[in-house]
Amino acid sequence: MYKFHLMAGACVAILGLVPGAAQAAAAAAADNSVTEVIVTATKTGSTNLQKTPLAISVVGGDSLKESRVISLKDISTVVSGVKIDSNAQDTIVRIRGIGGVTGIGDGDVSVYVDGVYLSRVSVAVQSNFNDLDRVEVVKGPQGTLFGRNAVGGALNFITKRPTHSFTFNNTLAVGNYNLIDEAFVVSGPISPTMQASLAVGYVKRDGYVTNVIPNMPNLGSSNRRNARVQLQWEPTEKISNILRADYIYTNEIMSTNQTLLVRTDDPRIAAGARYLAPIANSTVGDLSKVATDLTPYAMEQSYGINDEFRYKINDNLTISNLIAYRTDKSRTLRVANDATEYYLSDFIQVYREHQFSEELNLQHTFGPLTGVVGLYYFKEYQRQYYSAISGGRNPGRTGAGNYTLQDTKQPTTSKAIFFSETFHVTPAIGVTVGARYSQEVKGYDGINTQTVYDPGAANNGALMVSTAGVDFPFIRGYGSKTPALSKSQNAFTPKIAVDWQITDDSMVYASVARGFRSGGYANSARKDTASGTLTPQFTIPVRADFDPEWITTYEIGSKTELFDRRLRLNIAVFRNDWTNLQVTSGIAPSVNITNNAAAARVTGFDIDALAKPLDGLTLTASATFLPKAQYTEYKNANPPAGILLANLTASGDPRLKPANLNPLGTATYDASGKRLISAPKASIILTAQKDFELSGGGQIFARTEYQYTSITDFAVTNDALVQRPAYSLFNGQIGYKPPGGKWRAEIWGRNLTDEQYVNYINAGSQITAAVGTPRTFGVLLDYSF
């Protein structure tokens, strides 16, 4: 707590001192003011960030290179409100504490590349391009302009368009763990009306988590490559068309939830579940080591193509059309249920996805009225093939093992019409009204087959002999050309906002907005094909579908530039009312359901500041505070299994409802009033960069970055065993730019203090974690002409 107050005080002090420093530097050079930032989040064309009544954080220009922002996973290092959780093969994006993933993969934060929605966010995680122009982080629900699955907000990665003159940029970084990070982009004209660009990236790095099991590879390696080509055609001043295609490939050893946080013989574990695991227990307390006899890996290939057409009809009307297709296939293997030298189980998941989308917009300006009207269409086909083997042994495990095979198909079709209109009552006061009406149809088809194995003797890893096979079809129509189940849902997501441009450098705004995450189907009750009856785990039918979840956000904010535009200060205060939360939980071995189980409220505020108080000195601060982020009603939460459930039972926690009182045969927990998962009270990012001009025209620069994240919960029980302590990270760079600035060389380091921290904590038969990146360092050479 002392550390939190100290860091919060430091942030406030910096923000308080910056104006004084800027005032003292009033006589500094005129070019020392903060530069204008252009955004496209309103879909009405390019607008000035400071005159756009939205809470947007933008990372662009030199900041992209200086902070090494090249993919989704890097955004949380520069925007405090964004948190990226890596739970096994799932990447969960949260903004302002809002986020999550259902059993079918839909998230609460929508991710885009050049305006194209990505159903699989791993595409943005694995990219390694150096052709990014900027990243726009739009905070709060964006149900009007961005639609489905933008409950927490939207992230848009915007690439550089091909240039009208020849340019080339190459960036090479090498570092510890045998890092090689190479990326280049070449761009230029190929005819008087056509330009093209090619960007290629490659990253390879050894694993940074040491596997102490002999002859087993380390975890957390990188091995990915990608390419993107763009072709721009501008036959007239009014017409432009840009065609983009990209390819991404990755084949890596994952750093999954295999780091053991609590010893297997810890007294907090129920007596019957304790056992000795000498090798794994020796790693507890050192997050750089694991003991796993199976290598978790992730392989993925993704292809995408899109075409963006714009036609400026006249000074008042512009029509644009964005059409895109993407296909993705992946295969992952991970260990489950344990993190010791004893093999217990493993999961293999094969994923196929195809998506097609089209968005047609009409942007218009008529006197005081500016806006956009649009149509949107999205069609997707997902198929997930999932197999699990559970039959290994450790000294504490008894009972039968099993082999489970699950195959699901999930088609989705979404259509929407939307508008957003801003009317300026006076030149300084604007009123924005927008709405989106969406219609979505989701299908589901699936099958589950389980084979039970004889428990046999405790032989530390050998699979048992098969004695029985039981087939459990989820849906009777599996295998047909049309989905066996189909669910239609409609959503109306309005927004209203008022903004007042007090002066040319100061604006305030207030807004109310609504967003939704679409409903769908989850794996439901199993039926024995031989007897035609429900299995013993189910005495009543289980609902197979779940409804959309909703969020309403109330926000007020201010955007100000002070002291001859040497200080930019943007502040937003918000309240999120989150209802019908979709929660995925296990109700039986190998069976998960997703249902609407909770309501929550998140209140807090953001601060984004940029200052240039002295010549050559740039300071930034990004802070998000969430003093209240809790479940307001969550009476039937699924409690963490294993250790935590045993502790809850042993302590007689009155919030726990025993399994024998639940028709589904599982324990439930009243999490009402508990803090949300992965919603720290404070997230702070501070940076400082000083450029020193040399007499010969060259430049030396030094940059430091500081990140602080307060205590974070990863279980609805808020149990201390599944609670990440507060941690701080320090990054630094020192570099040189010669006269002319065509190249730069730097020495860089990240997590300089080698802080050991975790990205995610999982509670099961053991308490395990996915660890954060340790200290990394190296040199970088960037060349442009």
Image (cartoon, rainbow, N blue to C red):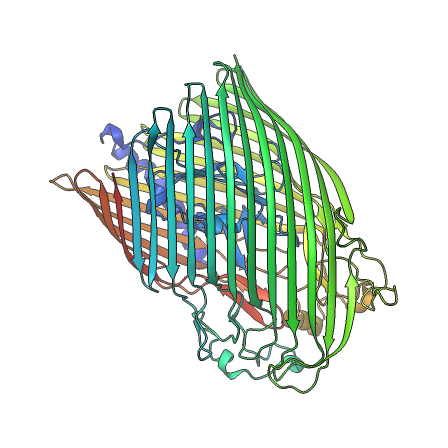
Look at the picture and state if 302 lies above or below 587. above
Residue 422, how many percent across, how many down?
Answer: 56, 21
Residue occupying image coordinates x 79% and y 62%: 526
Q: Residue furthest top?
A: 367
Look at the picture and state if 119 lies above or below 639. above
Quarter of the rendering containing residue 32: top left
Residue 719 makes an appearance in the image = no
* Apparent side of residue 435 relative to residue 736 in the rendered image (left or right): right
Q: 36 and 390: which one is in front?
A: 390
Quarter of the rendering containing residue 527: bottom right
Residue 4, how many percent across, how many down?
Answer: 45, 55
* Apparent side of residue 528 relative to residue 559 in the rendered image (left or right): right
* Apparent side of residue 67 relative to residue 150 in the rendered image (left or right): left
* Apparent side of residue 14 relative to residue 644 in the rendered image (left or right): left
Total numbered labels placed on residues in the image: 0
Q: Quadrant of the C terminus?
A: top left
Q: 188 and 21: which one is in front?
A: 188
Look at the picture and state if 345 lies above or below 436. below
Residue occupying image coordinates x 52% and y 58%: 86
Quarter of the rendering containing residue 187: top left
Residue 540, how many percent across, how many down?
Answer: 85, 60
Residue 55, how many percent across, how many down?
Answer: 50, 35
Residue 376 makes an appearance in the image = yes
Look at the picture and state if 210 lies above or below 717. below
Q: 684 and 749: which one is in front?
A: 749
Residue occupying image coordinates x 43% and y 29%: 50
Q: Residue furthest front?
A: 191
